[in-house]
Amino acid sequence: MGTPAFPSLGKHCSVDDCKQIDFLPFTCDSCNQVFCLEHRSYIQHQCPKANNKDVTVVICPLCAKGVRLIAGEDPNISWESHVNIECDPSNYGTATKKKKCPVRGCREVLTFSNKIKCRDCTVEHCLKHRFGPDHNCPGPKKPEPALKFMSLLSGSRKEEPKASHTSASSSSTWTKSFLNAASSFKASAEAGMAKLTSEFSQKLQTAREGSAQSSNNELEQCPRCKATFSSVTTLIEHVENVHEGKGNRVLKLPMDVCPKCSRGFRDPVALVEHVERDHGGKSKA
């Protein structure tokens, strides 16, 4: 078998009665044996595993659907499974009815090779009526906008006014209803915003008044004239109006001066600590 240059060239057919050497052998995809040209098919070499590659489809007489028979399984089981799960007798008329050209008066049955879909109306027609003027093509469909309100508005703008009084009255009625709806929506929105603003202002004023008052109901005392007030806000207004005037808002509190370095302190405790730390506890000059 083969030649001195190619010793592995060619193989013998696996059929016992043949054993012919073939330089272009065929390998069966089911039994994986090598055969010659004459015995390459399943039937010719009687392949024992041919059923694994065999595909058998039976048309159901009830729903006109194809039922595939599984290799190695009883056909009755496959049939019962289809009848109990997938079978729909109402689909028989749709599946068996032959589709014809939709042009009026044309009885041409549409098949795989004699039909064409119009790119404008996306409807299948026969070859005779494939052009738009032949089947009265309405043209491509316009995409619908996301907002129906805008489509109604644009449609009303594009419509030309008709001569009849009925169309003019209907158009004016639609315009009035649209304006009334828009004005009522605007009024309700403004009323809602005004109500929300007033409620927010009341809550803010209540919070400010609560924070201004003393938490434990103690009286606030003025450091200049020793007058008492019920809240901090009233005390600040008193100091601004009586002691400082309207232009100056800074409180002038009494200051203690160091006798050694003439440094001022508003807190007496801070003055004592300064003298003890910086002047060795001597307050005399």
Image (cartoon, rainbow, N blue to C red):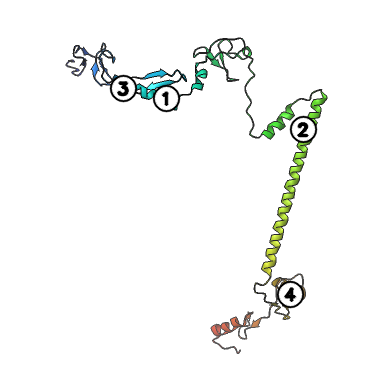
Q: Which mark is residue 52?
A: 3
Which of label 3 and label 2 is nearer to you?
3
Q: In this view, does 214 lie to the left or right of 241?
A: left
Q: Mark 1 points at which residue?
A: 82
Comparing 19 with 4, the one in front is 19
Relative to 245, say whether 137 is above or below: above
Residue type at mark 1: give it: His
Q: Of 24 and 229, which appears nearest the observer? A: 229
Above or below for 44 versus 144: above
Distance from the alpha carbon under mark 3 to that under mark 4? 105 Å
Q: Which residue shows up at 76% across the image and 36% down it?
A: 178
Question: Which of marks 2 and 4 precedes in the sequence?
Answer: 2
Tell me whether the residue at label 1 lies in contact with that at label 3, contact meaning CB atoms closer than 8 angstroms: no
Residue at figure coordinates x 63%, y 34% from the top left = 146
**Mark 2 — residue?**
174
Q: What element carries label 1?
A: helix
Q: How far apart are marks 2 and 1 (CA)?
A: 57 Å
Could you say whether the residue bearing mark 4 is in a helix, strand or loop?
helix
SS at circle 2: helix
Q: Which of marks 4 and 2 is in front?
A: 2
User: Mark 2–mark 1 contact, CB under 8 Å?
Assistant: no
Tag 4 near tag 2, CB within 8 Å: no
**Crowd class of label 2 (few under 14; some 14 to 19; many from 20; radius 10 Å):** few
Earlier sequence position, callout 1 versus callout 3: 3
Q: Which SS class for mark 3?
A: helix
Q: Where is residue 157 in the image (x, y as percent from the top left)?
A: 74, 29
Query: Are the residues flagged by discs 3 and 2 in contact, CB closer than 8 Å?
Result: no
Q: Quadrant of the N terminus?
A: top left
Query: Disc number at residue 239?
Result: 4
Within-10-Å neighbours for mark 1: few <14, some 14–19, many 20+: some
